[in-house]
Amino acid sequence: MPRPASTGSRLAACARACVLAMLLLAVQTAAASPSSTRERGLQLAREGRCPGALAELDRVRQASPADAELHLVRGQCLIRLQRYAEAVDALETARAIEPERPGVDVSLAIALYHLEQRDAAREALDRAEARDPERANVQLYRGLMLLDASENESGAAALERARGLDPGYAEPVSSFYQGVALAEQDRERARRALTRVVVDWPGTSWADEAQRILDRLDAPPFQWWVEGTVGTEYDTNVVLRGSGVELPRQISDEKDWRGVWTLSAGSSVFQDELWTVGLMGSYYGTRQHDVTEFDTHYPTVSAWVDRVLTEESVARVRYEFGHAWVDGDAYLVEHVLEGSLFHDFGAFGRTRLDLRWVRDDFRFDTFEVPDGNGTPGLPCSGNSSTCGPPGLNEASARNRDGWELGPGILHVLPLPELPGIENPTARGGYSWSWRDSRGREYSYQQHAFLLGSSAGLPGSLLLDLYVGFKYRPFEHPSTFPDRTPTNGVEYGLKPTNKREREWNVGASLERAIWKQLSLVLSWRYDDNDSTARVFDYDRHVVGLRVKGRLGP
């Protein structure tokens, strides 16, 4: 049986327990003291764990209003988190407490720079540089500020000094902006700087953008190209003969073969990082086998100006002048003015927005039809072989001269690749236009829709498919008869406004045969469903052409 503890033993055990409790309380108190919280916050900041550092430092900030280091570290962490306005408040507090403390002025300059307060940032950086010019962050932001002031050579030199002082801090920013600064005046140094970014920082947005700039630097100063095609087509309706309408006596057949050739050439005449100015000329010609009245020559010249808006967006203004001859006679003079906006959505495709104005001046004559007595089906007066409604001036009503204006949108979407299918894309677009002609026959609105797709196929083939639909509600009834007029009898007109629905379906298959030479097989079908039978036609066109291109 154990002996009971003595009174002295019990007192000793109680004393030990009290000492242990006091020690535990002291440890807990020390752990919760402001000084330990401050040290944890500073350590977290040194490790780059700024959200946790700010939480710790904010607990003791009110208790240590004169702690310049605490305010400096808070400001630096707020810069890392891009909370620049709060950073300025913290850093100005630190500077008011200890103006000469290292790191305060340069950190303040960085925060003010990102707030675009350039004058104040420059003053703070001047103070920092006067105190310690051999800091990498001082030279990095000195270089950026000099670039903002268009002092590119001095800015590039400051960025190079920053890289030499501390590449771990300054890169890839210093090399990237050094390359940008020198791109126009010293391309070789710019290439070296940008190549460092591409090689040392692969897979980053810095490397991707540096590679894009390198591609532009390595491109020829003037982009040029020449492209041409030559071949033959078979057209089932050369003259676009309407349903139930006879051909003129001098035209024996609407089906025919023809030779077809095109030529286009263009070049940029001015180019820098933001602007491109270019010129282009083109020519389209046909030679019919039988229906030679429709031999065509159509040259055009155009000029355009491109302006880079962002990394993904480009704006363009283009003007084109064209003059067409048919059967050796002047047929059409055309002016086109177009504004476009291109935007690249990356994996989601590319979009083009257009606003287009066209002015047409048709050079062929239209003719007046003798007036009848006002009753369709009755004989024409005099010796007229045909006559129309009285009071209608067909020569004026069928004048096609006029202008057309309207917006449009086209989007091209990359599709997932499948086995044997390369670079598949889908495209879709819509445009609306309003045409105002001098003659009432050709004034209308037009809604146009387009769907298409292209893809590379096995055997080095390129397939392109499209389908389009146009709806044209005209403003007036047609002035043309509903069918071929009976000889010597007055024809009548439909009282309702003309309407047209046009379908266009096509396909082409292209195969490279030698370097930049390819063979193109094409087919298209046009079907114009019109309430005026003279315009109600369809046709198939099958073509085989050789296509060549020179230039990038």
Image: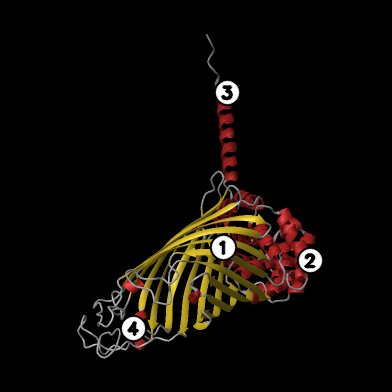
Dot 1 or dot 2, earlier in sequence: 1
Dot 2 or dot 3, earlier in sequence: 3
Residue named by callout 4: 440
Residue 375 x/y as whole percent:
19, 84
Rounded to the nearest angstrom, the CA distance separating label 1 from label 2 is 35 Å
Q: Is residue 476 above or below residue 171?
A: below
Residue 239 x/y as whole percent:
43, 72
Residue named by callout 1: 83
Would you call the spot at circle 2 few (<14 residues within 10 Å), some (14-19), or many (20 or more)?
some
The three-letter amino acid code for the residue at tag 2 is Arg
Which type of secondary structure does the marked residue at label 1 adopt?
loop
Q: Are marks 4 and 2 in contact (CB under 8 Å)?
A: no
Give the residue furthest to the front: 383
The three-letter amino acid code for the residue at tag 1 is Arg
Rounded to the nearest angstrom, the CA distance separating label 3 from label 1 is 65 Å
Can residue 120 be seen by looking at this rendering?
A: no
